[in-house]
């Protein structure tokens, strides 16, 4: 009998936990990066975030009220294995142990992500994802975490959106660790993350656990008749770089970027990476329109503006049909090699405000979620094996380089007082889950 469809919400440790120096946690690359002048909007930082480390019980109570059947959270690597290597921190593991038990008591499946961009700073100083040693350290961290929680937690995500972490953190320098590497350097970073996934998957599967890899996907369209090659180049980078090796055992054609193969690949690496997932996590926010680059441009594509559709507070185009198209595209591209899909993130930032009567009306978010869930429904009706949908996110949180300016949550958070206030979308999603269950 197939597993019941998972209705959930998602979050990330660095974005919600706070408590950066408590109970043995050591700094991550974001602890260091946000201190750089201009790195994060208005100098915001994650020191407190949503104070989830202390208010986790309150947040689990909110999850119970919401009626979700799964909660996707991330484990903080520097909280569980301080400095990135060495023995596990019993205090860090105890936090996730309590969280998992509290979720299970309410009938909510814990779905942990092992890496959501918070690399221990000591590993970064030793080379970070440019070093093969980081992949080995990640596998050891995955093993100790699985040993602590694997008796109750069966479904694990290794990496979150490695394409974003690679591009924003190592090519464009706008996320931690803030590097601007050349193409070979960026591709080496990509390969070592995939190697880390493969090594961790081996550890998890040896313990009888299920493994997912989550990536950010965006269906790509050429702007005009002469832009097909640019669209193919962007698609190879954004959608195929972290999926082809896992599902087909080889990297896509990256010659448009001047690459003659991927640096750092050793014999046996791709065999380890291939077939290493039991499910594929799909994070979707918007499609991408691509044009041919201007002469002399550094990249083989230029991003074009999608017009004629609503936008979120982030300025992202709202195109629910893009999620349906993406699910179809993955099925067409990978066929029998495609494992079950889980929409592990989907949501929108809106300008939310508390009204005098204590409500947070957010009709645009309700419409966004309604239409994207309908897109998933249509894909499933045509036979797509989609087994879960997770809203990003439960609480307004620290939104990376945007600080606290972007509100994605179903729950409004006053970051001065940490008061939680469910928005109208919270009630809407609660009612939808109750109806669907």
Image (cartoon, rainbow, N blue to C red):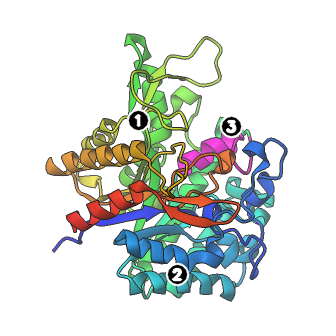
Residue beneath the point at 28% across and 42% down: 324
Spatial separation of the CA atoms under disc 3 and disc 2? 35 Å
Q: Is residue 183 above or below residue 22?
A: above
Residue indicated by mark 1:
318
- Give the alpha-carbon distance from disc 2 to disc 1, as whole Å: 34 Å
- State the image coordinates of residue 297 (x, y, percent, origin top left): 64, 18
Q: Secondary structure at mark 1?
A: loop
The circle on residue 29 is none
Name the image quarter holding the N terminus. Answer: bottom left
**Does the image show residue 185?**
no
Q: Which residues are magenta?
A: 162-179
The residue beneath circle 2 is 99
Viewer can see residue 251:
yes
For the point 49% across and 39% down, which residue is it? 238
Using the numbered discs, state the Cα–Cα distance from disc 3 to disc 1 in whole angstroms: 25 Å
Bin the neighbour count of mark 2 within 10 Å (Cα to Cα): few under 14, some 14-19, many 20 and up. some
Residue 295 figure quarter: top right
Name the residue located 45 percent from the left edge and 32 percent from the top edge: 317
For residue 172, the mark is 3
Is 127 on the left or on the right of 37, as rendered? left
Does residue 410 lie above or below 145 as drawn?
above
Contact? badges 2 and 1 (CB < 8 Å): no
Q: Quadrant of the C terminus?
A: bottom left
In this view, the mark in front (3 or 1): 1
Between residue 347 and residue 196, name the one nearer to us: 347
């Amino acid at each position: 009998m197939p597993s019941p469809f998972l209705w959930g919400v998602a979050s990330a440790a660095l974005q919600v936990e706070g408590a950066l120096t408590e109970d043995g946690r050591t700094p991550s690359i974001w602890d260091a990066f946000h201190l750089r002048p201009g790195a994060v909007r208005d100098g915001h930082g994650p020191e407190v975030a949503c104070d989830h480390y202390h208010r986790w019980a309150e947040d689990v109570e909110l999850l119970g009220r919401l009626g979700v059947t799964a909660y996707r959270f991330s484990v903080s690597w520097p909280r569980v294995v301080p400095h990135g290597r060495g023995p596990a921190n019993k205090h860090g593991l105890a936090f996730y142990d309590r969280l998992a038990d509290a979720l299970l008591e309410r009938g909510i499946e814990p779905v942990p992500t092992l890496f959501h961009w918070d690399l221990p700073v000591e590993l970064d100083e030793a080379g970070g994802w440019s070093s093969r040693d980081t992949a080995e350290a990640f596998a050891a961290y995955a093993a100790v975490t699985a040993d602590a929680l694997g008796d109750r937690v069966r479904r694990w995500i290794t990496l979150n959106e490695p394409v974003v972490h690679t591009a924003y953190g190592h090519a464009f320098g706008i996320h931690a660790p803030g590097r601007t590497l050349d193409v070979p350097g960026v591709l080496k970073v990509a390969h070592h993350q995939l190697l880390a996934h493969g090594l961790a998957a081996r550890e998890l599967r040896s313990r009888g656990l299920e493994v997912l890899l989550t990536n950010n996907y965006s269906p790509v369209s050429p702007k005009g008749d002469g832009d097909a090659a640019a669209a193919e180049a962007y698609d190879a980078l954004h959608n195929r770089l972290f999926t082809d090796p896992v599902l087909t055992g080889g990297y896509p054609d990256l010659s448009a970027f001047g690459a003659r193969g991927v640096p750092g690949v050793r014999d046996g690496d791709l065999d380890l990476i291939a077939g290493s997932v039991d499910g594929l996590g799909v994070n979707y926010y918007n499609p991408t329109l691509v044009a041919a680059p201007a002469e002399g441009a550094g990249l083989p594509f230029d991003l074009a503006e999608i017009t004629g559709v609503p936008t979120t507070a982030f300025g992202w185009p709202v195109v629910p049909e893009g999620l349906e198209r993406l699910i179809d595209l993955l099925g067409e591209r990978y066929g029998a090699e495609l494992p079950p899909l889980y929409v592990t993130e989907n949501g929108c930032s809106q300008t939310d405000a508390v009204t005098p009567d204590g409500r947070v009306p957010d009709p645009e978010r309700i419409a966004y979620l309604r239409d994207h869930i309908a897109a998933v429904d249509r894909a499933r009706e045509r036979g797509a094996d989609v087994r879960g949908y997770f809203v990003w996110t439960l609480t307004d949180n620290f939104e990376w380089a945007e600080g606290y300016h972007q509100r994605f949550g179903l729950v409004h958070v006053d970051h001065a007082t940490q008061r939680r206030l469910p928005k109208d979308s919270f009630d809407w999603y609660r009612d939808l889950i109750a109806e669907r269950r």
